[in-house]
Image: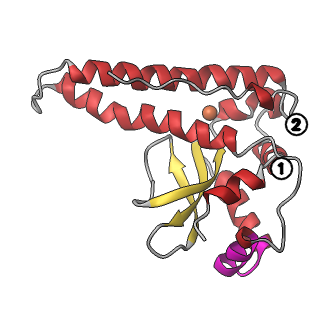
Amino acid sequence: MASYTAKDFSNLIGMDGFSETLLRNHFTLYQGYVNNTNKLQELLSGKPKDATNPEYAELKRRFGFEFNGMRLHEYYFENLGGKVSIDKSGILSKKLADAYDSYDIWEQDFRATGAMRGIGWAILYQDDVTGWLFNQWINEHEIGHLAGCKPILVMDVFEHAFLTDYGLKRADYIAAFFKNINWGAVETRLKQ
Ligand SMILES: [Fe+2]
């Protein structure tokens, strides 16, 4: 059976505002999601397909948690490590301004989405049908995804993403995240 392999994001070490300890721990957590996605695939392939079997049902439910935990970390690490701010005359900035009245209001909304109470993710999505952009809150890894929409910018706001460096000051972590967004990588995800 095909299995997933964890990607190497060690190029991010040294990023301003993120300690090596925090990043290495985060890579280890990400590796756990990859391992568990593979493990679940393996376990489910060997289980009788019996909906009345609670073990089968729980493994099936769990797959969304582990798979999204794996994939969202990949989006997150891939949209970090940038050194330049967003091109204000570029297509992404224009689309954000169209969606939220101005780039600044979009950024305020994205930061506020990420600062909400709870553990999860702030995700800028693009609707594949209309091309419209939305900032969305994802609870844990799997609850709240918009069907058929593509993640354009992904920010982890589980405590493990910031507690080591920022304690409970989530807004300070979000500020550090914004300083390190790889806008080039983000723009390549956008459908024009
Ligand atoms: Fe994480």
Magenta span: predominant SS is helix
Quadrant holding the N terminus? top left
Q: Amino acid at mark 1?
A: Ala
The answer to whether residue 118 is seen in the rendering is no
Q: Secondary structure at mark 2?
A: loop
- N-term mark: 1 or 2: 2
Q: Secondary structure at mark 1?
A: helix
Asked whether residue 13 is drawn in magenta, I would say no
Q: Are marks 1 and 2 in contact (CB under 8 Å)?
A: yes
Whole-percent x, y for residue 181 in the image: 78, 49
Where does the magenta region start and end? 93-103
Q: Which mark is residue 17?
A: 2
Q: Amino acid at mark 2?
A: Gly
Whole-percent x, y for residue 133 in the image: 58, 69
Q: How many marks?
A: 2
Closer to us: 60 or 189: 189
Left or right of 71? Residue 55 is left
Badge 1 crowding class, 10 Å Cα cut-off, few under 14, some 14 to 19, many 20 or more, is: few
The residue depicted at 53 percent of the width and 73 percent of the height is 131
Residue, disc 1: 175
Q: Specify the quarter for ligand 1.
A: top right
Whole-percent x, y for residue 10 in the image: 75, 25
Badge 2 crowding class, 10 Å Cα cut-off, few under 14, some 14 to 19, many 20 or more, is: some
Quadrant of residue 170 in the image? Answer: top right
Picture layout, residue 128 above or below residue 6 = below
Left or right of 32? Residue 113 is right
Quadrant of residue 13 in the image? Answer: top right
